[in-house]
Image: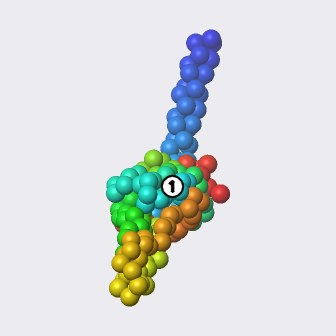
Amino acid sequence: MRNIEKVLVCALSVAAFDLFCNLAVAQEAKVRVPSGTVVAVRLEQVVDPKVQMLGSQVTAFVASDVQIDETTVIKAGAPVIANVEEVEKAASIGKGAKITVVLRSVQAVDGTNIPLSGTYRAVGENKEGSTIALGVLLCPLFLLREGEDTQLAAGAETRAMTLGESTVRVSAGEKI
């Protein structure tokens, strides 16, 4: 009788293990993230044309969870890849400063990188017209006057959109 009990216990253990494995697989699902899904992004640093150079990486994160059908596919705080694409310091003859940061991609809950389309842009006031007029009419030294400085503030938020369709694997625990 003991051998039959051992065989039954073994068979039940294998069946339970198989059931557990199937449930674990069934709890994971694929969620389609459509092109154009909005992602709120927040800068975590000041971005200043006096400091940043063309191509510099900028620290930014997702500001709030992104959900598809009540399933979180991108968590708040997920890193966003962003780079300085345009930078000009304020210059003489009243030329204002400029800086543009392009949002490239974001990391989904499963680690997938999802391409983004979005930018931050700041432009200092140009004073070229008044500077040239004052320089010609009054004194050429006015031509040395610089335009207005500018910067992107830490905490500044913008909206980006996903580029193309992506598929993200989520577990049942990701549902809200």
Identify residue for label 1.
Answer: 60
Which residue is at a point 34% across and 57% down the rendered structure image? 54
For the residue pair 160 and 123, the one nearer the viewer reads as 123
Q: Amino acid at mark 1?
A: Ala
For the residue pair 142 and 123, the one nearer the viewer reads as 142
Instruction: Residue 9: give x, y in percent of width and height.
Output: 60, 22
The image quadrant where one finds the C terminus is bottom right
In the rendered image, the vertical position of residue 133 relative to residue 149, given as above or below:
below
Instruction: Residue 119: give x, y in percent of width and height.
Output: 43, 67
Q: Residue furthest front?
A: 139
For the residue pair 104 and 59, the one nearer the viewer reads as 59
Q: Is residue 75 visible?
A: no
Q: Is residue 99 visible?
A: yes
Which residue is at a point 57% across and 37% down the rendered structure image? 20
Counting labels gives 1
Q: Residue furthest top?
A: 2
Instruction: Residue 25: give x, y in percent of width and height.
Output: 50, 44
For the residue pair 141 and 67, the one nearer the viewer reads as 141
Which residue is at a point 55% across and 48% down the rendered structure image? 171
In the rendered image, the vertical position of residue 156 relative to residue 11, given as above or below:
below
The image quadrant where one finds the N terminus is top right
Q: Residue furthest right?
A: 176
- Label 1 element class: strand
Which residue is at a point 56% across and 21% down the rendered structure image? 10
Residue 23 image-quadrant placement: top right
Q: From the viewer's perspective, tell me whether residue 118 is left or right of residue 176.
A: left
